Amino acid sequence: MYDLTNTSSEIREAKPQLAIFGIGAIEQHTKNLPVGTDWITVSELSKRVAREINAFLVPALPFSMSQCHGRMAGTVWLKPETLAKVVEDTVLSLYEQGIKKVVILNGHGGNFILEPVVQELNIIYKDLSIILVELEFAGITDIHAGTMETSLQLYLNEKNVRTDWVDYVPPVGREFLDYAVMELISPQGVWGTQSRGNKELGKKIMDTSVKNCIKKIHEIFNALEEKRSD
Amino acid sequence: MLSYNNSYIDIKKTNPQVAILGIASIEKHGNHLPVGTDYIITEEITKRVTKELNEKIYLLPTFPFGTSIGHTGTGGTIYVKYSTLIKVIKDLVESLYYQGINKVVLINNHGRAGGSRIVPQGNYITKTAVRQLNYEYPESSVIWVQPFSEAGEDLLNIFDSCEHDVHAGEIETSLMLFLKEKMVKKQKDGNIPDFSVEFLNYLPFNQISKDSVWGKPELGSFEKGEKALNILVQKTVEYIKNTFEQLDKMKSNKI
């Protein structure tokens, strides 16, 4: 794995073929989890994935589309147009130095701009392959600051977590996040069940996510190579 | 129902509170369907939905172009980039806002069966545009709906190849047979690529599927098209009514 601790010449000589670029967020995660929750998680996940597949690890982007938490303290957001430009520029600077495979590892559920960005770059630059991989864990369906994020923070960052858990599932569908800010839907900023979170589950989620991400990365790039050599 | 056929004064007097805008695409639909397939279907759905809602609604002309960059280079395809489409949507909604129309429904119909209320299809940027507009104009309620997603379960009962229908297949062929039979050419058997749909983000459409068909157009029929159109309209109307009702409640309790 190569990352920001290497020199430019080390990276040039190693000729990495693939880069990992995580996208985090700085946003409220109710009263007991740090605002950096998404960034901390995706930084760790990208590091582990990059290490396993010997990729070039780009520092994970701290900020992304968190406007739905906008009025809640500590939240810092990018507009979709801004995030799009940041991702495009990052990918193109990798492309210019010969890294033509990029994995965007999305660690924040609200980054809906990534899919069109990825599609457009893949079509415009024919020898570039950017794929989009999301942090997923089967069986947990909470949406924000719930079981999954609580468990991951307990595992990765226990000293910054308090245990005054909030359990709240709003009486509307997830699509309402397109129509109203989080504060209106869930005044304490939780959509899920924090009290079910625990450290062991956090480790299991991280380990499984690393495995799933790697499997998915291999599957997609293999299929793309096959198709392109047809 | 108000539309571009009404005069300024008709619209002013009626004082519509809701506007409906369809977003479509002009792109290759195999060798058997016109490039305007999405546009023709969207226009019909939006018109019927507006009539059904039976309220003072301003129906806008459907925006013909979508983010069809995956079909680049194929004859007749006209695409806008996502960064363009979001500007178009924002401008149109803003111009409604300044005349006092605070409720806007975007009907996104450049897509396929399946999907959900959360995951946008085809014109992905529609969802993002809606979110941004609701942040920028908190006193407005802009919502989006995908008829093919809303009626997903019903379509499964009408179409035999529904689960594998992505583009120019049984569903769109049936709808076009019902709406514009003369435009539909004789179909060859379709095909179902051995890929998941996320590959549409990674490769041009015609590299994934020859002729840009993903589905079984040969199974299409006039009758299926008629049935499907009715249910697409019904489910879309229900979604619009329920969502505005819930949103009104949410906003009046809390703001």
Image (tube, helix red, strand yellow):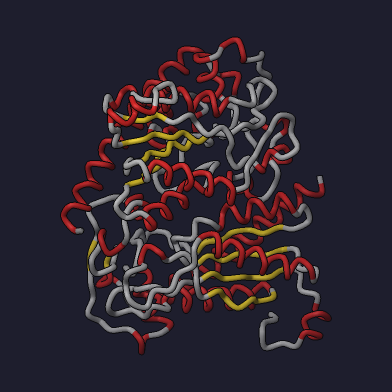
Q: Is residue A25 above or below residue A184?
A: below
Examine the rendering and report whether any part of residue B235 can be seen.
Answer: no
In this orientation, which residue lies closer to the viewer: B108 or B203?
B108
Is B80 left or right of B23, judged from the image as shown? right
How many numbered badges does the structure rendering display? 0
Is B78 left or right of B152, judged from the image as shown? right
Q: Quadrant of the C terminus of chain A?
A: top right
Give coordinates of residue B58: x percent, y percent. Answer: 36, 30
Q: Quadrant of the N terminus of chain A?
A: bottom right
In this orientation, which residue lies closer to the viewer: A43 or A115?
A115
The answer to which quarter of the image holds residue A190 is bottom left
In this orientation, which residue lies closer to the viewer: B103 or A177?
B103
Q: Is residue A96 above or below residue B209?
A: below
Examine the rendering and report whether any part of residue A164 can be seen.
Answer: yes
The answer to which quarter of the image holds residue A101 is bottom right
The answer to which quarter of the image holds residue B137 is bottom left
